[in-house]
Amino acid sequence: MFNKAIIAAAMLSALSFNVAQAADGTINFTGKILASTCDINGEASDVKIEVPLGTHLPTEFATTGNKSFNVPFSIDLTECDDSIKNAQVKFTGTADTNPQLIAVTGGAVGVGVGLYEEDGTQIAINTTSATKPVTAKAATLKYSANYVANGEAVEPGDANATADFSIEYP
């Protein structure tokens, strides 16, 4: 029994010497601590924005990429800390079969929801919008949304979608 313990200890000792150690890189962590951020649409948290995209016929989406009309919406930043000079929005959610779009739920098939900058540039879901200036402790971040044909056969039904957003201060 004593011999087995010695053999086990020797094997464990031999295995521990085979580990190589290397120092091959550096990680630099950078950031900033803000005194406070901005209020969003007059609220400090839990903001909900409703964007009604309307009622449409399947014939409007006969070809991949066909879009419904753009529906504008905005995110108003107020009471921003003096140190905040820029803001951008990260929209997150479930991607459609077209990963640029937000997936819809409720029964409709063949469309997703597209998000756009004020100038019409598309913002892919799970990415960040363009950086916008914050001046005088405030900013209005303007966007729009619409339905976009994703290439699947369009089937009628409710076409609801949800995206979460967070404000980033680069």
Image (cartoon, helix red, strand yellow):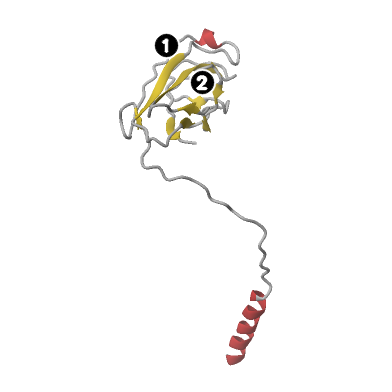
**Residue 48 locus on image (x, y percent):** 34, 27
**Residue 57 locus on image (x, y percent):** 48, 9
Residue sitting at the far bottom: 2
Residue closer to the observer: 8 or 69: 69
Q: Give me the C-alpha separation between circle 1 and circle 2.
A: 20 Å
- Which mark sits nearer the N-terminus, 1 or 2? 1
Type of amino acid at the residue the image marks with label 2? Tyr
Residue sitting at the far left: 43
Please give the residue where the numbered disc 2 appears in the rendered image: 116
Residue 21 in the image: above or below residue 148: below
Residue closer to the observer: 100 or 133: 133
Determine the image quadrant of residue 9: bottom right
The mark closer to the camera, 1 or 2, is 2
Crowding near the residue tagged with mark 1, few <14, some 14–19, many ≥20 C-alpha atoms within 10 Å: few
Residue 116 in the image: above or below residue 7: above
Residue closer to the observer: 93 or 121: 121
**Residue 74 locus on image (x, y percent):** 41, 21
Residue found 41% across the figure and 12% down from its top: 54
Type of amino acid at the residue the image marks with label 1? Thr
Residue 57 in the image: above or below residue 73: above
Residue found 47% across the figure and 15% down from its top: 156
**Residue 124 locus on image (x, y percent):** 55, 27
Quarter of the N terminus within the rendering = bottom right
- Badge 2 marks a residue whose secondary structure is strand
Please give the residue where the numbered disc 1 appears in the rendered image: 55
Indicate left or right for 45 with 3 as reference.
left
Crowding near the residue tagged with mark 2, few <14, some 14–19, many ≥20 C-alpha atoms within 10 Å: some
